[in-house]
Every structure is written in C-alpha cells, then in structure tokens.
Amino acid sequence: MTTVTLNLDSVELTDEQFYRLCQMNRDWQFERTAKGEIIIMSPVGGVSGNREADLITDLGLWNRQTQLGRVFSSSTIFRLPNNGDRSPDAAWVSLERWSALTDEQREKFPPICPDFVIELRSRTDALRPLQEKMQEYINSGLRLGWLINPQDEQVEIYRANCEVEIVHFPVSLSGEDVLPGFVLNLPMV
C-alpha cells in the first residue's frame, strides 16, 4: 500500500473538519496522526486484502460466540484520546466500553481507542510508520495489539506497560485476557 503524508504544521483541522474532509472524499482513505499529519492511503492489493479479510473473519467468529464486544474493519476510523484519527486493519472494542458511547459518537468516528488491534504489513508498507502507529495506539490506551509482518515472518506484540515482544512464524497468538479464548495461527495461507 502506498501512502502519502501531508504535513499540515500551520493548519489545524478540528475534529469536525477532519470528519467532513473524510465524508466529502469517500474514495480516499485518510488517517490523522497525533502530530496532525494527514495520511492518504491507497487500497491494498489482492493478497493483503485476502489476509485482512481472514483476520477480520477469525476475530468476528470468535466475537459472535463470546458476544464480548464489537469488531471493526479497516474502514473504521477511531478518534484516539491522543488526538490521532486511526483505522487499524482489524479492531475490537469491549461491549462495556462501546455501550458507554452515545449513538452520535458511534455513528461518526468513535472517540475511543480499541482494546485490541491488528495491523497487517503489506508488501509495499514501510515497517517504521506501522510501528509508530502501534505506539500511538498504546499511548491511547490499547490493551493488546499485533503488528503482523509477513515479509519478515514475524509478529510484534504490543501490550500496555510492556516492552514489544517479537515472535517468529509459525506462531499461535493468544488473545490473552483481552480476548479470552481467541487464538490466531500464523502464517496465514
């Protein structure tokens, strides 16, 4: 996936202005970093799109059985507490936290950091920006996150108040106490 980052140092968009920018340009996928940079992302290719769909499916099937929260796709932008507006490849928010939002907050860009995220590195993604994005999630209250890196056959596991753990394929990832009973086996086909 090719990305373009716009440096808007002297231009500050309010949350509402950023939301309207996204709504007026639905053919583009935007994110906004905690620093206020606007990132424009291109669509992913077939291999990454298929892998992402498999991840969302696995997470969604687990959630249907447990009914513990809500699962979100990469089309969802979350307004993070640190001022970033980010869309992970897959995300999960506990039902208790999701239910605490108003209907309007749920309808727009939810002002909440997911409890769990997955970022999947595409062949054309640089690793460093994804690692910075994962750190943004951690700084915003993320409890568990996986940065899946098929190119290097490894996963970086992000946990609140812990050092990043790196595990190599093949690996069986546990949802730990955040997603009880959820297991993801990698590598993916």
Image (spheres, helix red, strand yellow):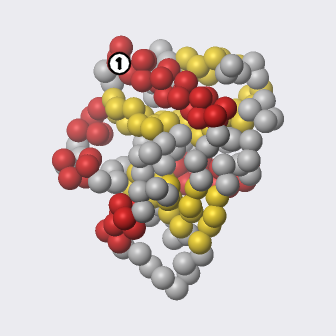
Q: Nearer the viewer, residue 131 or 2?
A: 2
On screen, residue 177 versus residue 124, left or right, reads left
Q: Residue at x 53, y 29 (%)?
A: 53
Single out the residue that lies furthest toward the right: 152
Q: Residue at x 74, y 51 (%)?
A: 126
How far from the left and from the top, in percent, is residue 123?
74, 42
Tell me where residue 63 sits by quadrant: top left
Tell me where residue 16 sits by quadrant: bottom left
- Residue 82 lies, with reference to residue 176, above or below; the image says below
- Residue 145 lies, with reference to residue 34, above or below; the image says above
How far from the left and from the top, in percent, is residue 13?
41, 75
- Residue 79 lies, with reference to residue 75, above or below; the image says below
On screen, residue 143 versus residue 157, left or right, reads left
How far from the left and from the top, in percent, is residue 8?
54, 78
Residue type at tag 1? Arg
Q: Which residue is mark 1?
A: 64
Q: Residue at x 53, y 67 (%)?
A: 38
In what quadrant of the picture does the C terminus appear?
Answer: top right
Q: Nearer the viewer, residue 132 or 57?
A: 57
